[in-house]
Amino acid sequence: MDANGILQILLYVALIVALTPLAGGYMARLYEGKLTWLAWIERLVYRLCGTSADREQHWTGYALSLLAFNLVGALALYGLQRLQGWLPMNPAGMAAVPADLAFNTAVSFTTNTNWQAYGGETTMSYLTQMAGLSVQNFVSAATGMVVAVVLIRGFARQSARSVGNFTVDLTRTVLYLLLPICVVGALALVWLGVPQNLSPYIEATTLEGAKQVIAQGPVASQMMIKHLGTNGGGFFNVNAAHPYENPNAVTNLIHMVAIFVLGAGLTNTFGRMVGDTRQGWAILAAMGLLFLAGIGITAWADAAGNPALAALGVDQALSPWQAGGNMEGKEVRFGIALSALFATITTAASCGAVIAMHDSLMPLAGLAPMVNMMLGEVVVGGVGAGFYGMLIFVILSVFIAGLMVGRTPEYVGKKIEAREMKLAVIVILVFPIGILGLGALALLTGPEAITAPGPHGLSQLLYAYTSATANNGSAFAGFGANTVLHNTLLGLAMLLGRFMVIVPTLAIAGAVAAKKAVPPSSGTLPTHGWLFVGLLVSVVLVVGGLTFFPVIALGPVVEHLSLASGTLF
Amino acid sequence: MSVHRPQGLALFDHAILARAAIDAVKKLDPRQLVRNPVMFATALVAVVASVLTARGGEHLGVMIQISVWLWFTVLFANFAEAIAEGRGKAQAASLRKTKTEAAAKQVTSTDAATFQTIPAQRLRAGDLVVCEAGDVIPGDGDVVAGIATVDESAITGESAPVIRESGGDRSAVTGGTRVVSDRIVVQITVNPGESFLDRMITLVEGAKRQKTPNEIALTILLVGMTLIFLFVVATLPVFASYSGAVVPVVFLAALFVTLIPTTIGGLLSAIGIAGMDRLVKFNVIAKSGRAVEAAGDIDVLLLDKTGTITLGARQAAEFLPLAEVNERDLAEAAFLSSLADETPEGKSIVTLARTRFGLAEPDRGGMSFVPFTAQTRMSGVNMNGGSWGGVMTAVSEIRKGASDAITNYVAERSGRMPGGGPKELNQLVERVAKSGGTPLVVARDGRPLGVIHLKDIIKPGIRERFATLRAMGIKTVMVTGDNPLTAAAIAAEAGVDDFLAEATPEKKLELIREYQQGGRLVAMCGDGSNDAPALAQADVGVAMNTGTQAAREAGNMVDLESDPTKLIEIVMIGKQLLMSRGALTTFSIANDVAKYFAIIPALFLAAYPQLQALNVMHLASPQSAVLSAIIFNALIIIALIPLALKGVRYRPAGAEALLKRNLLVYGLGGLGVPFVGIKLIDLAVAALGLA
């Protein structure tokens, strides 16, 4: 990797840090109800839904509304896929999606995973893409946001019974946050060369005289929300590596910034709403350290190139004539640094969009994205989801460390007691269940989906179940996931990873909202300093590391060690 | 501030150790084990491993050893708990000795003139008993008639007998103490088996011990970790067999037990029992473990001024003569008038006059002393001529007393005022009052001479203790009946953060509620019946043993030595208890990293020889690696028993400093220690040819 690559990474980090307080401040105003410039649409929506905007819900009511909304969304998306052959806006004449794939996809998009066991341009009609997938891109992102906001309210409020109104929160998220940014962003993308049409596919004759079908469609509108909402479901099969999704360096930067901006901003929103922005910065700092470690490993491992090729005398050095390093599965226009950066961002943030094929990353370079997901997608994370996931780790850290300073643990004034612990433990159990439990079941029942021999084959399966449980959606593309078995199991993993985290999180929010706040003193564990940041990072790494060390050892680690010693499978 | 142990046992007493070894085996009873989920899981795994070993197979020698060490892990944890219980029981037994088979003289007539003798256990709350000189008081109760001196040394260790009388704040008596003189009628207030002693004994006995809130939360975390590792280990054979590795189940069992938090799981209840035990050593009896834990969370300490912050009595600090008067004359008059004054204040005036002017002892022959009465509110001396240092003294009349009493006296005598008249005197009086002192005016022959400044003496070292508390994040509030002016001055001098002046029990209760509304936890101590509501309201209420039964019922701790400054130690014991749990949890989790590096390469080496790179400790063989890890895991429990019993070192400091230190010691230490430990055990295992 050269200075140019490092500079691009630093530029990106600087942009996110600069945007955090802006996004955070805007969202704080939004969720404190101070933004009203679209009040007339809001009122219309509430009247249509029959909601009274000022009636707040207990966390249980909130959770029920959220689950019902997501259930209806998933059913609608399932129906749309199954019926698309008879519905309009289908110039390419796509047939009904098979039941298992439709289930998988419906779950995938409602859970903000956007795992795609299909190729977009060869499976989905324009109507399905627009009215189904894009709609879920918005509302699944908004679902994650509102859960985060409820948790923030839990910590910000005192002796409160209610945590907010789901309909209001969801509507305001879409209306004031996602839609405006996406409208502006999509227009910018169109201007930068991303297509936005409903035209039939174009048949082109290549220079060699071959015929090639070039897919078209309303790409730009889906691109913006795909990244902003950390959905990651590509319009095209190769996702953001496709020149229509990601034509140039500027669109690439827009995509990357969009992935992190809301997740990072939420830390600041949290700080503002609990009245101490340092708390937010501490969380962001912990995320930042993990992020930099991830990008460092990925970029270093890929830039080093493949020792097996080196042994054959292939020159993989960086030079003015070649990008150098391991360029398999990468776009030459993006190179090592940007591909590594994007791979780290997309897995850190539960997005899952890709500009390079993760299956082709060097073992350790592929390990870092996998670990990003195994840690629970808390390195900035999915919109909302990353923040509340990280707060679960904060609760664990505060509990262990809080005891060590001789007090009942507390965080931003709220005591962490048995109930919160119970709920947090349920959440951290999700990952072993989804990744190890369902992964082992899949390995026993459907090993034929694995296409690579040796430890890399295990990595493929592991990556798939990790990606699904973590609601990421990216894949080691070699894995043949589109079977009834894997569509079903991965669907379950996605549901587990989404709702078995959301419901306990809402319960925690309800529990802490009901508590009185303890004013801080010098006996209170400080949660805004570097000491705490270090502690939080350690807890995230230890909990994730201890859970997954054995399988990682059998997958990427062995693959790396073998490659280094010249053993191939 | 060192934690002193008035009647500490040696850390390991032989009798207790022997007893604990037997109890450790008894505690294998599943009904007892199930209370500790981590150890229960370990025991289940030990059963499975034993059964598999009995069926035989490859590596049988290692399998047998692993099974044995799995059982040792459970036994060591039981042993830790048994030792803590044994020590607690020994403490309780020394208290319980007093609960010998006392006979009770139950009152049978309304005037308490006649009684029948029955065994003490048959007494019920509400019964009246007579206790005469030489009798052991048969149960906790209140004196309803009479006054007696009682020897409470059996409970408090204080040899001087104390007065117990009906009514007032000294009416409570404790079962097992002995009446030294006189006769009292006691109303028994608790049924047998429910006294403080009985409750305390239950608290240190593991079987009946209730888990405290933090302990429950921590147990949930430990169960969660156990479940995680259950998934890790249970799914591992699938991933391993895909990779072409065959892992013996006994090795998996070893991996599981080394990973789950057995260290903290095994020591958790020992820590809790030892925490209660430390309180008992301080002669404080807690009614629940919850109260001890709450003590660590205290944000606000309410402390009575008298006896806690200041010495019980005020002391003369200086003589302030009027302009025309010589200071020595004032001192002489004060000295003479106080010679017969036996109050601490009076004695301190004599001492001050002596040290300032070297006054000699006069011949008391010609003096008649006038004692203090509530009517005159003055005391003094009438000099009828006599010798003092060889010189005959003139006939004169000296009085000292509160400013208004002396002013009246002077006006009555003559009204003749020296110097600036009453205005100057008033200024002196006011000056003393403003500085937090008590002014005493001295007059000789109807002529005011000046003012004695009686000062509340702040206990030595108390200011530093408050500074320590502040560093710990605890706010101190002084409660006093003084007027706000005086209170403010004393508060400033003692270094408390705030004060409640002109306090009444109602105001005190109000203040506690106010703090609690703001989310703070409040501790206080009290003795009088009128303290009972506040004691009950406070999160930690320490009742003095000398106090009333009502107060002792209302509080959640009783201090047998009746020393209010102990609140500070109680808070520290509470904090130390929580810290010990946190530190050992951190240590336990951090240990897992090294265990992985020992076991994972060992399990898969046959399938992937490349994994030798992860064998950073260079352990001799896969079998010895697994064996060494499980041995380390068992031995570390034994090694940490002393720490669990003593509690981690607690140095009062802010949370940041504590966290830094404990993370360094128990976090980084927990990462590093097992690497060294497992390597050393591996060397031994290899040398002995065990694997």
Image: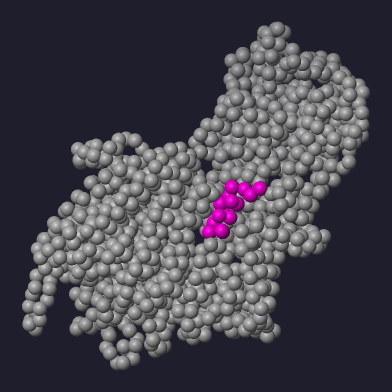
Viewer-side residue, B323 vs B550: B550
Task: Please tell me whether residue B270 is drawn above or below residue B137 in the rendered image.
Answer: below
Count all numbered tags in the image, as a single digit.
0
Q: How is the image coloured?
A: one colour
**Point 32% across, 65% down: residue:** A100
Q: Main secondary structure of the magenta part?
A: helix
Viewer-side residue, A197 vs B482: A197
Assess whether residue B217 is covered by the magenta stretch. Answer: yes
**Point 65% across, 69% down: residue:** B46
In the image: residue A65, left or right of residue A240: right
Task: Please tell me whether residue B201 is drawn above or below residue B266 in the rendered image.
Answer: above
Quadrant in which residue A57 is drawn: top left
In the image: residue B128, left or right of residue A450: right
**Point 71% across, 29% down: residue:** B550
Quadrant (top left/top right/bottom left/bottom right) for the N terminus of chain A: bottom left
Give the magenta range. B210-224
